[in-house]
Amino acid sequence: MKIFSIRKWMIDYLWNMRKFLIVLLILTSAMQVKSQFFNRVDTINVVENGTQLQNPWSGGINFPAVNEVDVNGDGKKDIFIYDKFNSRNTVFLNNGNTNYNLAWDYAPEYNNKFPEIRQWVLMYDYNCDGREDLFTLSPVALSAMAVYRNDFTIATGLQWTLVDDYLDEKYQTLRQNIFASGVSQPGLSDIDGDGDMDIIGYNSIADARFIFHKNYSMERYGNCDSLDFEYATGCWGSFALLVGGANQVGCFHCPCREGRVDTTSHKFEKPVYEQSEAAPQDDTVSAMLLIDIDGDNDKDILIGDVASYNSLLVINDGSNVTADMGSQDTIFPSYDVSAIFDGFHYHSYMDIDNDGIKDLLVVPNFNENHEGMWFYRNDGTTAHPVFEFTTKSFLQKGMIEAGENAAPVLYDYDNDGLLDLMLGFDEFVNATLSNKTGIRYYRNTGTASLPAFELIDSDVATISQYNFVSPVYPAFGDLDGDGDKDMIVGNEDGRLAYFINNGGAGNVSDFSFVAFYYMSIDVGKYSTPQIYDLNNDGLNDLIIGEQNGYINLYKNIGSTSSAFFDAAPTNDTLGCIEIHRPSFVDGYTVPFFYDSLGSKRLLVANENGLIYSYDSIDANISGCFHLKGFAFDNSESDRLKFNITVSGGDLNGDGLTDLLIGQSTGGVEVRYQSNSGIGISEPVKIKPSFTLSPNPANEKLNLRFFNLVSLQNSAIKIYDIAGKIVFKSTVRSIESQIDISSLHDGIYMMQLISGENSVSRKFIVSH
């Protein structure tokens, strides 16, 4: 077994405790102030490689469990993603577009509409009411599962009712839990074809067998709305996996040996998943998908494994009633691009491109973080699928996706008066866990009040060549008095790398490497610097966060032409700030000082996924800062993320400091400061949207609009591939048709502008 697999199991165990402690911290904190004066913005356009991103600010994806569920009651299946390691929910609404790149709109207003999920999540309509119900690891036992019923109504919206927090079954004369673990989720399907949902589990200790938990809802009640299970067999399919880490079948038509070995008598005793027993220690199957691959109306099985690189397909040569596995594809799909990546394969079967046929997603549960959603389009039918590889980065291509540990900072790189986005990143690049760290440069191509960003340089100053250990955190300030801002880079080793800016005052930045160990400064681990004149003496000081939850001040004792810092901090507990989890020594502080209405303010991001707000800083540098509360409500949908960062600047020209929040999942979040600057929360605004058809189009283009501010305040524009406007019109009705017969064959971009928001779709004209 690979070392990383063991690490992952340890992480799974610690994560349960971690979440408890984080929640405890929040509940017991004396900070009751909810100062939500930074409001989320998702409408800033971003272009990468000539393509406008569909959902640039959706936060990145690393360890996804992907399911479909209708969250808004419009009859279309939306995408729900649970990020296992970061405990983060992400929802994408289905806008009905048949172009899979453009069919999904990020909808953060739904992220918090789900019950607490533990380790894994599966959606399945067990009661046949047309709404997907939710299955996850039990809150009361680490070896059982919980079931939440989807009780959506138009009046209440999406809501869930806990049906069972300890799903059990009859075994002989006893009741016992249906076994599940943090790394081995079950398979849900109508296995025997009787109309109700059965469960397939996995038993690694007995002899790598699959367990059939039969649901008797139809037999006993005549409907499928119950969860009435009995243990049917511990040898479903008459096959066993090869023990020892390889994801392949060890034997077909193997003798069935129910239960586990008693090493003293060499007899077989009660099943391993009996509630009185401990969870298996070598549980290696990570996920399974029950699906009819060969179109013979019985369930085949796709298997992912913690310690293996392949997807395993095992074909059922038997029937629904009596499964009998007879063949395997160890590098599925062997007829196309095989799903080969570093471990923990998770399979999802859903209609991605809105053609009415279910497609396949294969995702890793670790590693491959910037290309972690493999989309296989189904060129066959739902009943008899034929999967064709399409992309390794479904949804991720439409967002800012830096891999892991995104560290965004605003800095006018090209000196045009607009703040550009500099993004520190860390991404895995191969199965040996090698990583690439660096800084991206997104130029602000918008205006002082309406920013827009375009990726210009994916590796500023070729920083990746220096092999910094993640996270890479940049800071900018003039350290040599030549009128341009130099760059300091913090990283895991606790030191600072120095890059001098040779561009000169008023010119485009030109960074070159000077030193790995700037001024002999070392804060221990995970240095997160900011260059800022804290004491108002005209000299740029260094403020550095670090692993242990403190903030270090290094006062500049040099001059305007030559900064100088002692190796020892001036104050290693600046502001009396100490942020870390209860019973732990780590905090991973990220400080951001800014000026607000003539006073200094401080925001501190940390490992808990929270951002703390401080004032009473002026004339109190050697004292204790006042903790106001959280920068925004910690109950928001996307809190409890792992290791976030914070920085900012005035993006919209209103004189207030706006925020950029870096996610451990590799994405970025933008928040504008409200004009009031006090605890008034604006409601989440749903972005406007539209569909267009047909695509490709000939003479006419049919349009349908959603979530408009008003008809009077909405318009459309069409751009050709050169960026020239070739058509524009106000929106006159929710449904309309426009004449495109005068447009030449080619690719065009349609932009919908509604109030201050805009969204774009690509389409093709072919006469």
Image (cartoon, helix red, strand yellow):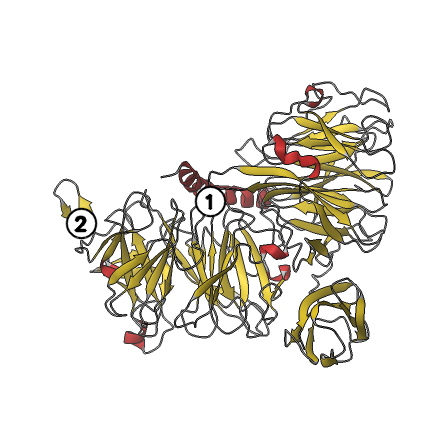
The residue labelled by disc 1 is 16
Q: Residues within 10 Å of mark 1 (few under 14, many from 20)?
A: some
Which of marks 1 and 2 precedes in the sequence? Answer: 1
Figure check: 628 above or below 349: above
Name the residue carrying label 2.
269
Q: As shown in the figure, which amino acid type bears the numbered disc 1?
A: Asn
Left of 188 or right of it: where is 541? right
Residue 742 quadrant: bottom right
Give coordinates of residue 205: x percent, y percent: 26, 46
Report the quarter where the C terminus lies.
bottom right
- Which sits in the foreground, 127 or 9? 9
Q: Can residue 36 be seen in this view?
A: no
720 and 344: which is toward the camera: 720
- Counting from the top left corner in percent of width and height, residue 134 is at 46, 62
Q: Residues within 10 Å of mark 2 (few under 14, many from 20)?
A: some
Q: Nearer the viewer, residue 625 or 118?
A: 118
Which residue lies at the image location 77% right of the left edge and 62% below the top edge?
722
Residue 521, image x, y percentages: 68, 22
Q: Is residue 722 visible?
A: yes
Relative vertical location of residue 356 with respect to residue 24 in this rendering, above or below: below
Helix, strand or loop for disc 2:
loop
